[in-house]
Amino acid sequence: MTNKICTQCARSTNLELTTLYTNAVVLTRCQHCGKPLDPNLEYSTLIIVMNYALHRLETVRHVLFNLERDRTFWLRKVGGIIIVPLVYLRLGDGVGFSRAIIEVLLSHVVLCALVWGVLAALNTRVSVQLVVKACTLPLAINLPVLFIRLWEYTDVIATITNAFVLSLMGVGVFSVVEIKRRDGIVVLTFLSCFIGVAGRALFEHWLGREGCDRISVKSWCL
């Protein structure tokens, strides 16, 4: 199980995030920076979702490390909020249902495996679960795209949406990497994400993918 972290200074802590003090629950302060470990605990779910979408680093850390959920919760979210929209978008490209599911699941497994593999190869061993969460949760932005597609879905919308997804994925991977090292974080984040996205594109090209609901660059679907 991953230790909780301070969302302010990104240092691991064994302290409880909240403390009972004079019959009131207060935020525990970090032993390193002296600030509250996780102010996001006082925010509503809507505020957390908005801050996460706005790439707030403190909120990304909260979602990846401090948000306590069991594995069945993440499986439901991955299946209901993330995978289903991606399959629907592929169906809109004229792909069969079974092939759409296989493409979506396998291509995402390749993406996560490559990101984790690059980090491990460069002596940054992080939890597979954290990498999967960092690479998967940003895909939830495709949910509102389903409603947009009911009226119109253009290449511009697809490009903007998936550029947003990739940038949020980068912030998530950055948050995972910074726990293990303090130097070369940006370069390592960019390299791992680039190889992951490029490897996914190569894998889908090998599968004979038709159409692209993401960012298309010279017949390659990023």
Image (cartoon, rainbow, N blue to C red):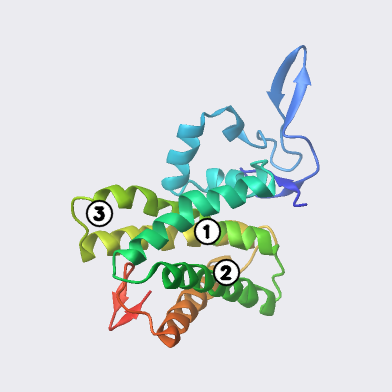
x%, y% of residue 92? 29, 64
Q: Residues within 10 Å of mark 3 (few under 14, many from 20)?
A: some
Q: Earlier in the sequence, mark 3 or mark 1?
A: 1
Is residue 136 visible in this depiction of the protein? yes
Q: Secondary structure at mark 2?
A: helix
Q: Secondary structure at mark 3?
A: helix
x%, y% of residue 131? 61, 62
Q: Residue furthest right?
A: 14
x%, y% of residue 113? 60, 73
Confirm or deny contact between disc 2 and disc 1 (CB under 8 A).
Answer: yes
Q: What quarter of the picture does the C terminus occupy?
A: bottom left
Q: Amino acid at mark 1?
A: Thr
Q: Which numbered circle lies on residue 85?
A: none
Residue 158: name its quadrant: bottom left
Q: Amino acid at mark 2?
A: Cys
Q: Earlier in the sequence, mark 2 or mark 1?
A: 2
Q: Which residue is mark 2?
A: 112
Between marks 3 and 2, how big is the CA–CA gap? 27 Å
User: Image check: 21 left or right of 61?
Assistant: right
